[in-house]
Image (cartoon, rainbow, N blue to C red):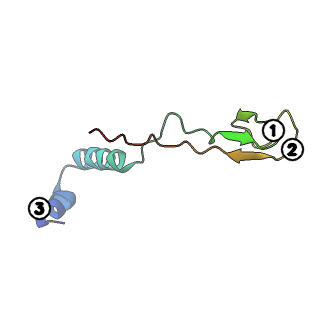
Amino acid sequence: MSMVWLWNRVFGDPARIEQEERAEKQARAPQLEVDAGPPPGRCRACGYQGPERYCPTCLADTMVAVRHKKPRATVRK
């Protein structure tokens, strides 16, 4: 912190200080992802894929997380 920042906080305009605090707080807030749903899963028994924890087809706790493979880098000669 600088002395100028502290001076402005102590003796500055309260409305401007509040506006700056809101802007700083908004800048530090974590950005939420739009597609922040549960990870997709696949049933080990029947192969059903979906976001549910329990397979609606088998009615059992047989869902495992699906890992998406990253595309392999191709080497050009």
Closest to the observer: 38 or 29? 38
Distance CA(mark 1)–CA(mark 2): 6 Å
**Contact? badges 1 and 2 (CB < 8 Å):** yes
On residue 55, the disc is 1
Name, please, the residue furthest toward the front. 77
Q: Judge left or right: residue 64 versus residue 8.
A: right
Three-letter code, disc 2: Ala
Label 2 crowd bin: few (<14), some (14–19), many (20+), radius 10 Å: few
Residue 53: percent from the left, percent from the top? 75, 43
Three-letter code, disc 3: Val
Q: What quarter of the picture does the C terminus occupy?
A: top left
Q: Judge left or right: residue 48 versus residue 17.
A: right
Find disc 3 in the rendering and name its residue. 4
Sequence order check: which comes first, mark 1 or mark 3? 3
Closest to the observer: 48 or 38? 48
Secondary structure beneath dot 2 equals loop
Residue 12: percent from the left, percent from the top? 17, 53
Secondary structure beneath dot 1 equals loop
Task: For marks 3 and 2, give the one nearer the viewer.
Answer: 2
Residue 65: percent from the left, percent from the top? 66, 46
The image quadrant of residue 48 is top right
Find disc 2 in the rendering and name its residue. 60
Name, please, the residue furthest toward the left. 4
Distance CA(mark 3)–CA(mark 2): 63 Å
Residue 57: percent from the left, percent from the top? 85, 33
Task: For marks 1 and 3, give the one nearer the viewer.
Answer: 1
The image quadrant of residue 23 is top left
Distance CA(mark 1)–CA(mark 3): 61 Å
